[in-house]
Image (spheres, rainbow, N blue to C red):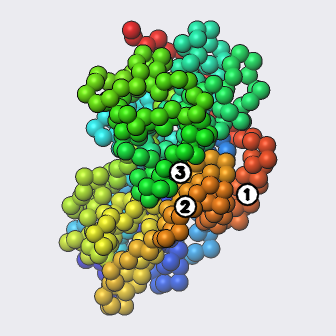
Amino acid sequence: MPDSGRQHHVVVVGGGFAGLWATRALAGDDVRITLVDRRNHHLFQPLLYQVATAGLSAPDIAAPLRHILRGQYNVEVRLGEVTDIDTAAHTVTLADGDAIGYDSLLLASGATHAYFGHDDWAGDAPGLKTLDDALLIRRRVLLAFERAEAADDPAERDAWLSFAVVGGGPTGVELAGTLAEIARKTLRREFRHIDPANARVRLVEAGARVLSTFPESLSDKARRQLEKLGVEVLTGAPVSAIDAHGFSLSQPDQTTRAAPGAKPSQIDAASGAGSVGHGVAPVRVAARTVLWAAGVAASPLGALLDAERDRAGRILVDPDLRVPGHPDVFVAGDLASVVQDGKPVPGVAPAAKQMGAHVAAAIRARLTGKPTPAFRYRDFGNLATIGRMAAVVHFGRLKLSGVLAWWFWLVVHIAFLIGFRNRLVVMLNWAWAYWSYQRHARIIFGKPDPPDDPPAL
């Protein structure tokens, strides 16, 4: 057991919202903290799609952990990846072989993509969780227009101008709406052989409606706002296959609708099939850019701990966020499976922040010999932006959509950013984009991708 005569050592794994908020909440306590993260920065994930779509640069929504914590002298930041947890010896081991002892351990390593048993899709349909993901998506989106400009074959050109976002949650809705705006506004008059406005952006959702966690009325308004932007919303359409040249839909139903002004049929000549009902063969859709926003799985770090997990890999924790059987181990954020009032606590930034602050209070209570309180999540509502002057907001009885919701979303996200510089830069970039429709970060990094083989017939 840890030596009670020395300063209590808290090891925090993960510098996201939960880990950072716990660390900062312990700033005035007589504890020693080691914050371990694979990356050197804290990322404001709610605006990650803006980096992916060239609206913001990476430093605009991220800040070095060492800089954020430079004035908190009871913290040591360690760049590394945890590869083993020994709860008997009270140590975590890093990839470089170093072992770090702890008195209290907080696991807050977040989440990753879930492809529902189809991990082979990851290479052709990247998800969006890190800055690396965002830069990869930005590269693919911008290169698609360049490839279309250079293509001589009309079918090949159409395939490059076909974009699909799989998953109708907030991330999928935000990506699809922004892609439509880029094609119809940002890139206007910049190409000589193609009209970017002819690009087709499809939002593919297996469920009955987009934004399923919102009230149905707001979900319907979001759909109509997407269609107004030019997005083709396909609901009740599970994806059955994805490769470098497109995707297949299994048993799409009659709820599939095309955007106003789009080409006549929903899944038409580009796929070789028309709109169909249940019980038919999969429908093939040609699309050279497919983005994944459909599934989330807990960080693999949870598998290192001898604890019960749910189907998504989240650790089932006690009401005070401690791991059953391990009173000195806490879990917070997307890695924790927490049920409150019969409903799971959502994997959103406000919940992670609240969990991090609660863990700090629980450690403080443990040091003073007091019982650790149960975690209570305060729901501050749901927000999702769809495009320019279009968003939906749900907070208790308050339901907003359109321009007012967009301004609400704007203010909240600027306020929640880390640091004055980030707030100022994002505000100026958004102001410029509002008046000009321009996206200053449209830079393609790296060498051009080599040409690939044509799709098999």
Label 3 sits on residue: 221
**How far apart are labels 1 and 3 at the CA level?**
26 Å
Q: Is residue 110 above or below residue 377?
A: above
Circle 2: element type: strand
Q: Quadrant of residue 247?
A: top left
In the image, what residue type sits under mark 3? Answer: Lys
In the image, what residue type sits under mark 1? Answer: Met
Label 2 sits on residue: 393
How many other residues sit within 10 Å of disc 3, few (<14), some (14-19) or many (≥20)? some
Of the two numbered discs 2 and 3 in the rendering, the one whose residue sits closer to the viewer: 3
Please tell me which residue is depicted at 44% across the width and 19% down the height of the picture: 271
Label 1 sits on residue: 427
Residue 431 shows up from this direction: yes
Give 128 or 346, whichever is nearer the viewer.
346
Q: Is residue 166 above or below residue 373?
A: above
- Marks 1/2 in contact by CB < 8 Å: the verdict is no
Residue 49 shows up from this direction: no
Residue lying at the far bottom of the rendered structure: 369
Q: Determine whether, in the image, residue 52 is placed left or right of residue 115.
A: right
Of the two numbered discs 1 and 3 in the rendering, the one whose residue sits closer to the viewer: 3
